[in-house]
Amino acid sequence: MRSYETMYILRADLGDTELEAAIAKYQTLLQDQGSESIQIQHRGKRRLAYEIKKHRDGVYVQMNYNAKPGTIELMERSMRLSDEVIRYMTLVVKPEEIVEEVADDAVAATEAEAASA
């Protein structure tokens, strides 16, 4: 299994229940395919930098998870065929990137403590 990060944008005109259903749909799809450590961050409604499929606003959702490569193809196909998803992108998160982020956070926390003392 590899670590992945998927960011997708849902249509802003969806209601709250439709938004939650769309988010749950992709979470369930990952769980059914045996993915682990699924973390979902609802980033909220934002203005798009440019118009996509005649939409100026969108609801951003970020998912971090561990999955098999075949799972990504299945999920992206589902997103491509969905009317709710405006745009999506999946990235492979390399283990050394995770370690660097944790190390950077630790350094920042140490510097903050030193500054407050």
Image (tube, helix red, strand yellow):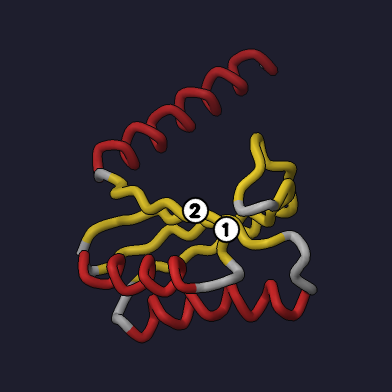
Q: Quadrant of residue 41?
A: bottom right
Q: Quadrant of residue 35?
A: bottom left
Name the residue rendered at 46%, 82% in the picture.
Answer: 28
Q: Which three-letter amino acid code belongs to the residue tagged 1?
A: Ile
Name the residue rendered at 63%, 61% in the picture.
Answer: 10
The numbered dot on residue 7 is 2
State the SS at label 2: strand
Name, please, the residue furthest toward the bottom: 32
The x and y percentages for residue 99 are: 31, 38
The x and y percentages for residue 56 are: 73, 46
Q: Is residue 79 left or right of residue 18?
A: left
Residue of label 1? 86
Q: Residues within 10 Å of mark 1 (few under 14, many from 20)?
A: many
Task: Answer above or below: position of 92 versus 77.
Answer: above
Tally of numbered discs: 2
Name the residue rendered at 64%, 37% in the picture.
Answer: 50
Task: Answer above or below: position of 108 versus 16.
Answer: above
18, 49: nearer the viewer = 49
State the SS at label 1: strand
Q: Residues within 10 Å of mark 2 (few under 14, many from 20)?
A: some
Task: Answer above or below: position of 9 versus 77.
Answer: above
Nearer the N terminus, badge 1 or badge 2? Answer: 2
Name the residue rendered at 74%, 52% in the picture.
Answer: 45
The x and y percentages for residue 71 are: 28, 72
Q: Which three-letter amino acid code belongs to the residue tagged 2?
A: Met
The x and y percentages for residue 89 are: 42, 51
